[in-house]
Image (cartoon, rainbow, N blue to C red):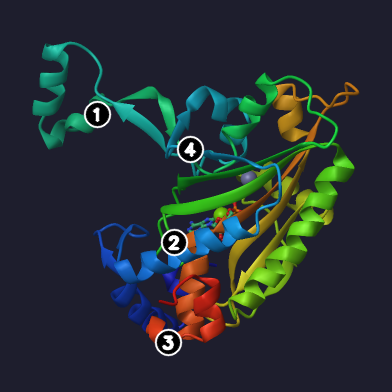
Amino acid sequence: MNDAATIGLEVPTRTAGLLEALFRRSGVDGLHARTDRFERVVEGLQTLITQHREKDVEVLRFPPVMSRRNLEKSGYLHSFPHLLGAVCCLHGDETAIRAAVDRPDEKGGWVASLAATDLVLSPAACYPVYPLAAERGPVAGKGLIFDVACDCFRHEPSLNIDRMQSFRMREYVFVGAPGQVNAFRARWIERAQGIAEQLGLSHQLAGASDPFFGRVGKIMAVSQMEQELKLEMLIPVRSADEPTACMSFNCHRDHFGEAWGLRCEDGTVAHTGCVAFGIDRLALALFAQHGLDLVKWPRTVRTALSLNP
Ligand code: ATP
Ligand code: ZN
Ligand code: MG
């Protein structure tokens, strides 16, 4: 659905202007250098999301790589092996590494000697937070809220401007009782719609599913959809007919609680949920909606993004 072949001719033309004005090409699909114009809006968005932060929230900023073991334990490998990127290096003594570097391309080149390390590229901002929360023992009555962010990687190269291999994600994560998670998600759906309005972005909410791998994955996706565990805020970026998921509101139920032994004070397994902001997609949506010239953006939008002098 997102492949270049399925895009009408007019769509790439429409987004080509955005690509030229906001990014510098890297030669790899879905990987761009970002211009100052784009980053000013990104910074404004980050500040705006911080302004909406609830009280008693712990802020953590994660590196773009995380523990391979922890991601495996979270179940990511099982559900999304096709999206995962791992950090591989040349191991061994000087002779072994020199031989790898000098191996001719027709014999596989240096890449043939790469072997895994204990790191993977983080596919979402919230994965590293669950083991940290679990280490602290039972979750106090009112639950825990985290504000997390990182640069994410997903192996989904695409010519579509809104599908990147490397992108920034900001999330608020809740850990606590099931009812508290639902209330957290409901509050954030409401608040996020307010943010979209502040930003002058036309938006709609829709049920969604994650791209679980393989045939069993299709069943998991249907069940996720049926139980309304994932909602997305769709905003036009490439076209109004095919709006882009710029935020998601996720209920994980006891998935991470079970994986990490997260408990509430009464001994029951803690539930978790997260609200994720696709920062690069939100910035793209703003340019798609309001044009390339920041000075001409509506005053209210400029104010919301701290762009006014
Ligand atoms: P999609 O259905 O478009 O693949 P997703 O369901 O995989 O999105 P989430 O896993 O919910 O997305 O990630 C949270 C947010 O991160 C998304 O709402 C989106 O804004 C952003 N995001 C996800 N994948 C990408 C990507 N490849 N490029 C840019 N932003 C992304
Ligand atoms: Zn999350
Ligand atoms: Mg996806």
The earlier-in-sequence mark between 4 and 3 is: 3
Q: Quadrant of the C terminus?
A: bottom left
Q: Residue 248 carries which label?
A: none
Say whether marks 4 and 3 touch (CB < 8 Å). Answer: no
Q: Residue at x 44, y 63 (%)?
A: 42
The earlier-in-sequence mark between 4 and 2 is: 2
Give the amino acid type for the residue marked by disc 1 in the picture: Ala
Q: Distance between the residues labelled 1 and 4?
A: 30 Å
Q: Residue 112 carries which label?
A: 1
The earlier-in-sequence mark between 1 and 4 is: 4
Q: Residue 10 carries which label?
A: 3
Q: Quadrant of ligand 3?
A: bottom right
The earlier-in-sequence mark between 2 and 1 is: 2
Q: Quadrant of the N terminus?
A: bottom right
Residue 207 placement (x, y as % from top left): 75, 62
Q: Distance between the residues labelled 4 and 3?
A: 39 Å
Q: Distance between the residues labelled 2 and 1?
A: 40 Å
Local crowd size for mark 2, using a 10 Å CA cut-off: few (<14), some (14–19), many (≥20): some
Labels 3, 1: front one:
3
Labels 1, 4: front one:
4
Q: Residue 43 carries which label?
A: 2
Labels 4, 3: front one:
4
The earlier-in-sequence mark between 2 and 3 is: 3
